[in-house]
Image (spheres, grey):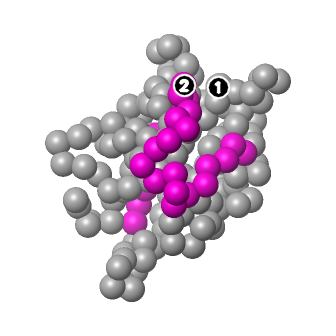
Amino acid sequence: MSKKGEQIAALPMRWDEDGKLKVMMVTSRGTGRWVVPKGWEMDNTKPWKAASIEAMEEAGIKGRISRDAIGTFKYDKVLDNGKKLPCVVRVYPMIVETLKKDWKERKQRRRKWFSPKAAARRVNEKQLAKLLRSLDHKPRKQPVIRKLLKAS
């Protein structure tokens, strides 16, 4: 596990029956605030694959994940010893295909679908909020998402 302050995250998404984009957020274990499924990079695992594993462990979701990050955000990770480690998180969009009823951290977290704008209002990280708001208008036109949708 690297502690150099670089993390990976999945941004789970789907389109509802009205064609509106929804993103899934999970609550953090410590504070219960809304976050994207994220974690440390894993040795011998591609970063997008590690993000996919985090999405399964934290939110019980499987899907197609992009090999390209859609953006990054910064935050201060509070470590077990109370110190803060500045982190940069690379965010990989994921088209959700399966929602599991039972998953590793289901007793420690809640998961919920939001519109990108509603999700942006609930997160503490300004850069993540900006990234989420950027998905509010024509998300299918964003190159990383367009490429992911074509791959299906």
Q: Which residues are magenta?
A: 87-114
The answer to which of 87 and 112 lies nearer the viewer is: 112
Residue drawn at 60 percent across, 30 percent down: 142
| Within-10-Å neighbours for mark 2: few <14, some 14–19, many 20+ | few
Q: Residue shown at 56%/33% (left/top)?
A: 99
Could you say where residue 78 lies in the image, as x and y percent from the top left? 42, 77
Q: List the residue tagged with mark 1.
A: 141
* Residue 47 image offset from top left, x and y in percent: 31, 42
Residue located at (75% from left, 27% from top): 16
**Residue 97 percent location from the top left of the image:** 54, 25
Residue 150, compared with residue 72, is above or below; it is above
Check the image and report above or below for 54 versus 97: below
Q: How many marks?
A: 2
Let me know if residue 9 appears in the view: no
The residue where tag 2 is placed is 97
Residue 25: x, y in percent? Answer: 61, 50
Question: Is the residue 51 above or below the residue 106 in the image?
Answer: above
Residue drawn at x 50%, y 13% is 152
| Quarter location, residue 140 | top right
Neighbor class of circle 1 (other Cα within 10 Å; few <14, some 14-19, many 20+) is: few
Asked if the magenta segment contains residue 105, the reply would be: yes
Q: Name the side, left or right, on which 63 lies relative to 133.
A: left
In what element is the residue under mark 2?
Answer: strand
Frontmost residue, 38 versus 61? 61
Farthest residue toward the right?
18
Spot the residue most to the bottom: 82
**Callout 1 amino acid:** Lys
Between label 1 and label 2, give the one nearer the viewer: 2
Q: Can see residue 147?
A: yes
